[in-house]
Image (cartoon, helix red, strand yellow):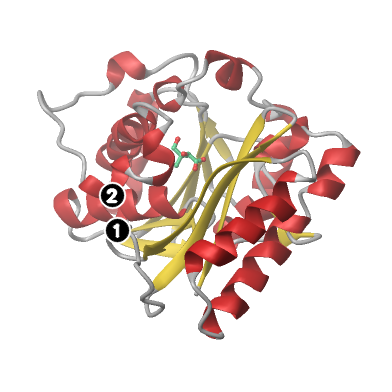
Amino acid sequence: MLIIDNKKSLSKIIKKHRSEGNKISLIPTMGNLHQGHQELFASAPDGTIKISSIYVNPLQFNNSDDYDYYPRTLHDDLDVCKKNHIDILYVPDGDISHEIEIENSIDLPKFTRYLCGQTREDHFLGVYKIVKHLFKTIQPDFACFGKKDYQQLLLIKYIAKTYFSNLEIIEVDTVRSNNIALSSRLKRLNNESLEKIKIIYDVLLNMRNQMFDGNDFADIKKDALLEIECHDIRVEYLEHRENDTLELANGQLINSSLFIAYTAENIRLIDNIQI
Ligand code: PAF
């Protein structure tokens, strides 16, 4: 595995691979690699040059504590990348925000203002900037992203469709352990909280069943919130929205999902299930 820490060397090696007719898959990450990331790595098509990046992007953090305490485990991550047959790992040295060229005015799609966009100011703008920068620099043929960050996935599909028409986005199912959607932030929870948040997925599944039985979302939500919040979990949002636009689903079950953001021990987590 080749480890690269600067854009110049990265562009050079990509040029070489392109000239040899190789296709490229990109798996961008912020490190602290877990089984969810390994699923992303495994989804990159065989026969392509697999490039991953590890970069905790300051532009997408609206909370400096969250950025400062974001788990950084580069030493272990290198082993995970090697074991998963990553060919090139891009680990920028320091903050690369200054390298990112951006248009004067960025008009993000409306769906970025819902769900996480309501409270995480500029988060999606930060994701947009770094992901577009990586796509521009690496020009991948394929890029893999997880459905756990569903709103991010929609934004990435928007970036690909608008600016990189030859890029195929590979959508990867959420990986769960003990029902909990894997996330790097779980590292910051104690065992007691890890036990408590197992309930989230059960509640979502139960809500889905009740919706199939014709119950009203508002009523189901009331009960779900009571059940979750008595486990010391604070719910930031619990919403039923359309999959493509993230507009409120208003009782329409087809092509919709349940989305939740919650905090346990002050650590914010998200999850979703398709109806
Ligand atoms: O999902 C993530 O880990 C990050 O948001 C991403 C896509 C790597 C951009 O920094």
Determine whether, in the image, residue 22 is placed left or right of residue 102. right
Q: Residues within 10 Å of mark 2 (few under 14, many from 20)?
A: some
Q: Nearer the viewer, residue 219 or 50?
A: 219
At a point 20% along the width and 52% down the height, the residue shown is 164
Judging by the rendered image, the residue that carries numbered circle 1 is 247
Determine whether, in the image, residue 167 is placed left or right of residue 202. left
Q: Nearer the viewer, residue 167 or 236?
A: 236
Q: Residue furthest bottom?
A: 213
Determine the CA span between mark 2 and mark 1: 7 Å
Q: Residue furthest left?
A: 104
Quadrant of image for the N terminus: top right
Q: Which percent across, then down, holds residue 37? A: 61, 51
Q: Which percent across, then down, holds residue 162? A: 15, 52
- Give me the disc on residue 111: 2
At a point 69% along the width and 63% down the height, the residue shown is 203
Q: Is residue 65 above or below residue 34?
A: above
Determine if residue 83 is in view. Answer: no
Q: Nearer the viewer, residue 49 or 135?
A: 135
At a point 78% along the width and 55% down the height, the residue shown is 198
Task: Tell me the amino acid under the disc marked 1.
Answer: Glu
Determine if residue 256 is in view. Answer: yes
| Element type at mark 1 | loop
